[in-house]
Image (cartoon, rainbow, N blue to C red):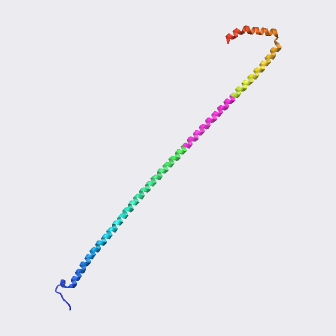
Amino acid sequence: MEHHYAHFWLDPKFWVAVSFVIFVLLVGRMAWAKITEALDGRATRVRAELDEAARLRAEAEAMRKQAEAEREAALREAEALIARARAEAARLAQATAEEAEAAAARRERMAMDRIAAAEAGAIAAVRNAAAEVAVNAARQVIAEQVDAAADAALIDAATADLPRALRAA
């Protein structure tokens, strides 16, 4: 039994084919919507991950620059500390040298003062000894050469000369 339909739209195969195409179109459209939605979500996640990676890279770059700046600042500070330490060491060396020179000069002055004092003491001792020797010698000479009459004449002359000697002094 073969049916020949006058028009193709009367054929059930045509309507099955049309309904199949409509079904495929509807299912395809829903599948396409789901697929594009999934792809859009994935693209959004990838874009967010790329943005996060770019942000992290920018942060890392900023941290690297900050670390380099801090390292350079620390180097400059260390160099400044070394320079100050060297200057302080030079100043201390200069002060120590000046203090040693002053101490040596004081010791030299003290030694010279001691020498001068010892010299003056020695000269005084020699003068005293010489005076004592002269007094003893004069006493001996006077005792040998002066008798009682000459002694009385000397005392009279000295007392007569006393007013003039006192005026001169």
Q: Which residue sits furthest bottom?
A: 1
Residue extent of the magenta highlight: 88-116
Residue lying at 23% horizontally and 82% vertically, measured from the top left: 17
Residue lying at 65% horizontally and 33% vertically, measured from the top left: 108
In the depicted structure, whether residue 121 falls above or below residue 68: above
Question: The N terminus is located in which quarter?
Answer: bottom left
In the depicted structure, whether residue 11 falls above or below residue 137: below
In the depicted structure, whether residue 72 falls above or below residue 26: above
Total number of numbered discs in the rendering = 0
**Coordinates of residue 91 in the picture (x, y in percent):** 56, 41
Q: Is residue 143 left or right of residue 11?
A: right
Q: Check if residue 41 falls in the magenta segment.
A: no
Residue 137 occupies quadrant: top right
**Coordinates of residue 160 in the picture (x, y in percent):** 73, 7
Q: Is the magenta stretch mostly helix, strand or loop?
A: helix
Q: Check if residue 114 falls in the magenta segment.
A: yes
Residue 32 occupies quadrant: bottom left
Question: The C terminus is located in which quarter?
Answer: top right
Residue 131 occupies quadrant: top right
**Coordinates of residue 128 in the picture (x, y in percent):** 74, 22
Q: Please state which of residues 159 and 65 is positioned toward the viewer in this rendering.
A: 159
Residue lying at 43% horizontally and 54% vertically, measured from the top left: 66
Q: Please state which of residues 52 and 100 is positioned toward the viewer in this rendering.
A: 52
**Coordinates of residue 165 in the picture (x, y in percent):** 70, 11
Q: Is residue 140 left or right of residue 105?
A: right
Q: Is residue 125 left or right of residue 80?
A: right
Q: In this view, does 44 lie to the left or right of 137?
A: left
Residue lying at 73% horizontally and 9% vertically, measured from the top left: 159
